[in-house]
Image: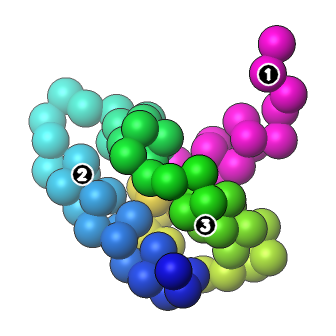
Amino acid sequence: MSPDKLVYTANQIGKFFATQKKTDAPAAIEDHLRKFWDPRMRKQICAHLESGGGGFDPLVRTAVESLAAKSRTPAA
C-alpha cells in the first residue's frame, strides 16, 4: 500500500478516536494500528514517518511516533 493511502487511513482512524470523549486518542489510535493493521503496514507507516514523510494529523503523528519507538525497542 502506498504511504499516502496508509496516512489517509490512519488519519481517518484518528478522526474517529478524536471524537470519543474520555479517550486518550493517541493511545487508542496506536492500539488500533497494533491490533488491526498487518505488520507490513505498520512497518511502512513507521518508515514513512522516520523518513520525514508528512501528512499526519497531530494525534496520528503522536500515535505513529509511539508505535515506531516501541517497534525499535527489543521485546523483553
Give the tally of numbered discs.
Answer: 3
Q: How far separated are the C-alphas under marks 2 and 3?
A: 20 Å
Q: Residue furthest top?
A: 76
Badge 3 vs badge 1, beta-carbon distance below 8 Å: no
Q: Position of residue 8 (x, y in %)?
A: 38, 78
Name the residue located 62 percent from the left edge and 44 percent from the top edge: 67
Q: Say what secondary structure mark 1 lies in.
A: loop
The residue where tag 1 is placed is 75
Badge 2 vs badge 3, beta-carbon distance below 8 Å: no
Magenta segment, prevailing SS (helix, strand or loop): helix
Give the position of the C terminus as an image quadrant: top right
* Numbered label attached to residue 18: 2
- Give the image quarter of residue 72: top right
Closer mark to the observer between disc 2 and disc 3: 3
Asked if residue 71 can be seen in this view, the reply is yes
Q: Say what secondary structure mark 3 lies in.
A: helix
Q: Say what secondary structure mark 2 lies in.
A: helix
Using a 10 Å C-alpha cutoff, classify the residue at mark 2 as few (fewer than 14 neighbours), some (14 to 19) or many (20 or more).
Answer: some
Name the residue located 71 percent from the left edge and 36 percent from the top edge: 70
Q: Position of residue 44 (x, y in %)?
A: 65, 68
Q: Is residue 14 above or below residue 69?
A: below
The residue where tag 3 is placed is 45
Name the residue located 24 percent from the left edge and 48 percent from the top edge: 17
- Give the image quarter of residue 45: bottom right
Looking at the rendering, the stretch of residues picked out in magenta corresponds to: 62-76
Closer mark to the observer between disc 2 and disc 1: 1
Q: Earlier in the sequence, mark 2 or mark 1?
A: 2
Image position of 59 (left or right of 66): left
Q: How far separated are the C-alphas under marks 2 and 1?
A: 29 Å
Residue type at numbered disc 3:
Ile
